[in-house]
Image (spheres, helix red, strand yellow):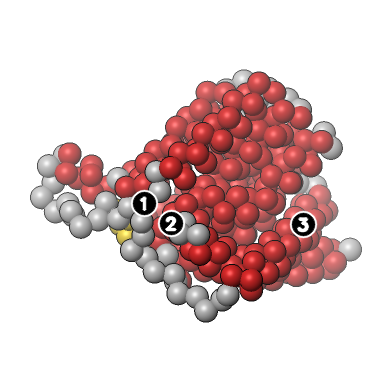
Amino acid sequence: MLGYLISYMIFGGILLAYGSDWFIEGSTRVAKHFNVSNFVIGATIVAFGTSLPEIVTSSGAALSGSPGLAVGNAVGSCIANIGIILGISVLMYPLIIKKRAIIKNGNIYLLATILLVILGYNGFSRFDGLILFLFMITYVIYTIKTSESDDEEIISDLTTKKASIFIVVGLLAVILGSDLFIEGAKGIAEYFNVPESIIGFSLVAFGTSLPELASSVAAAKRKLGSIVLGNVIGSNIANTCIALSFSAMIVDIPKYNVELMVNTIMALLIIFTMNREKIKKMLKFKNYRTDYFSKIDRIDGISYILIYLIFLAYLLGYIF
């Protein structure tokens, strides 16, 4: 039994890695055909596509009467997206931020995170879920209307027809891979009698974040920093404003204030690093840069990963 569960995780991980790479390759080619900017590609097409596992898993958990698993998956994935996905991507390839739209969308993400804390202080009701979903619609409209031209060139020899096939096949592989990985991870956790909420915030959250990891690393390797940040920010907004909102509209979700606070700390940290040069200028530091807004480097990546590991230690009861 345990061997089958481990094989599910391994095979699911392989599908996630290849599927995400195919999806980002195809989606960027098709979007560029319609003159869509890289950040919009990352913040909408790639972000929502790779967030489908969270949306489906959280909604399914809510329908099956497991609200702890639903909120754990949605919010836990947000924490993993910054702590692991962005952390590993930056550790491999530091990111330079030059586009104002990225900063603005990051600030919108912070607003969404604060809204999440306010609405979820006593748990999430159906009305709270509706508010989050309306925020999501507003974000998509704003992102498309305020997108800027890019200086990051995407080179691809794919035709639009082949790119469309890549999108469909890649997305199917991502969804199937996530399903296999989650089934294996949940089975292993249940095999060792791990509580449902811990499963949601750790194994399931990490498993459904694997598409973001594969897509972000693939984009970072191609030096497409706009897509990396757009993917993380867009995915986190999708996780909270779609995955969590759908779950809340299905069933009332209990409060998890500590976990929401960790998510807020992560959001504040990424906003700080994205606005670092601006903050230096405001504080009248002499070594601030004017040729870019900020640089998220390897030290930042290490800090993201460390905070995530501390969070996992808390979940497992090793600290506090």
Q: Is residue 267 left or right of residue 191?
A: left
- What type is the residue that disc 1 sits on? Glu
x then y, percent, for residue 316: 64, 46
Q: Quadrant of the N terminus?
A: bottom right
Task: Name which of mark 3 and mark 2 comes first in the sequence.
Answer: 2
Crowdedness of circle 2 by 10 Å Cα count: few (<14), some, many (20+)?
many
Residue occupied by mark 1: 148
Which residue is nearer to you in this view: 147 or 224?
A: 147
Camera-near label (1 vs 3) is 1
x then y, percent, for residue 211: 62, 60
Q: Report how far apart the C-alphas of labels 3 and 2 lie in the structure.
A: 31 Å
Looking at the picture, does residue 258 appear above or below residue 212?
Answer: above
Looking at the picture, does residue 278 appear above or below residue 92?
Answer: above
- What type is the residue that disc 2 sits on? Ser
Q: Report how far apart the C-alphas of labels 1 and 3 lie in the structure.
A: 36 Å
Residue in view at x 33 percent, y 63 percent: 151
Residue in view at x 76 percent, y 28 percent: 251
x then y, percent, for residue 58: 72, 41
Residue occupied by mark 2: 37
Q: Residue furthest bottom?
A: 157
Count the numbered circles shown: 3
Q: Quadrant of the C terminus?
A: top right
Q: Can residue 107 be seen?
A: yes
- What type is the residue that disc 3 sits on? Asp
The answer to the question of whether label 2 and label 1 lie on touching residues, with beta carbons closer than 8 A, is: yes
- Give the quarter of the image for residue 126: top right
Residue 179 - label: 3
Q: Is residue 286 left or right of residue 317?
A: left
The answer to the question of whether label 3 and label 2 lie on touching residues, with beta carbons closer than 8 A, is: no
Residue in view at x 55 percent, y 64 percent: 30
Camera-near label (3 vs 2) is 2
